[in-house]
Image (tube, rainbow, N blue to C red):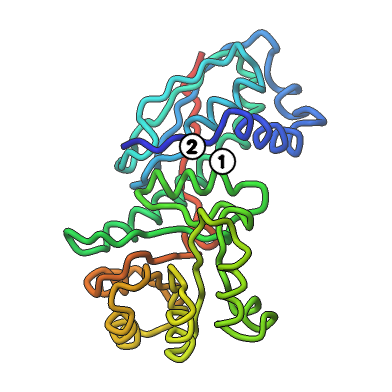
Amino acid sequence: MQAAPPAPTILEETVRRALAEDIDRGDVTTEACVSPTAMGSATLHAREPVVVCGLPVLEEVYRQVDSLVDVDPLVTDGDLVEAGTALATVSGPAISILLGERVALNFMQRLTGVSTMTRRFVDALPDGSSTRITDTRKTTPGLRALERYAVRCGGGFNHREDLGAAVLIKDNHIAAAGGVRQAVERAKAHAPHTGRIECEVDTRAQLDEALEAGADIVMLDNFDDDAVREAIAAIGGRAIVEVSGGITIERVATLGALGVDVVSVGALTHSSPSCDLGLDWSGA
């Protein structure tokens, strides 16, 4: 199923800020070199194998720059393409195409990097695995909605959207509350009845305490594979099992085979390298 992009209002505002950052004072180079009546076209190419993401953002960039620019996508977000594949064509006033080029590429390269990295993690799961690869809130400020869309395009899932979306008790909450049991019990007493209670645990003792207090989800943080195996046996289906910390692509197959429900990977959004894409001029 194709991932749904962020709401149009989010796209519009995110792109508006990016364009203001880059072109509020105009483009002195293009204005000096290119005739205001010149028309042209350019093609967006992948210069390496990628999972495409960001075409709606590309369209929004040029919609805001100049409604006379036509963007024609040639693939779909979520498609896995080879190096050299044409992703979209952009045609219209030459000045406008050049004006939006850098902002459009910045978005496309960043989002395609996230979707491509996510696909690598998803593909590393063993066949038949029901384990979910999810992101975290370790996103670029102001770009969370777009980066999480990129995770979905790569076949991953999203963790909680923001602090108001779900209860997730972490180490500092535990310290401030006076312990795991106190934190979980207070959360169960005060959180909305429609929400699950998730608790991060660092040790087997904390895991036992979280289960006894009634946590619905336990996040095994920085457990090695043997400790994860023992924890799953101890949990015995009483809670959803999430694993985080020290997650590599090489380790995902083992965690999937162990039956972990969720593997959360901050690197999907905080460490994915931008992909090599280029907007190549193809003439008038």
Q: Amino acid at mark 1?
A: Phe
Tally the marks: 2
* Numbered tag placed on residue 253 in the rendering: none
Question: Up-down: is 97 above or below 1?
Answer: above
Q: Nearer the viewer, residue 106 or 281?
A: 106
Q: Earlier in the sequence, mark 2 or mark 1?
A: 2
In this rendering, position of residue 195 left or right of residue 223: right
What residue does disc 1 label?
107
What residue does disc 2 label?
54
In this rendering, position of residue 77 left or right of residue 7: left
Q: Residue 86, image x and y in percent?
A: 37, 31
Please report the residue visible at 64 percent of the width from the left and 76 percent of the height from the top. 173
Q: Residue 253, image x and y in percent?
A: 25, 70
User: Which residue in the rendered view is the most extreme toward the right?
Assistant: 25
Mark 2 vs mark 1, CA separation in Å: 7 Å
Question: Up-down: is 259 above or below 14?
Answer: below
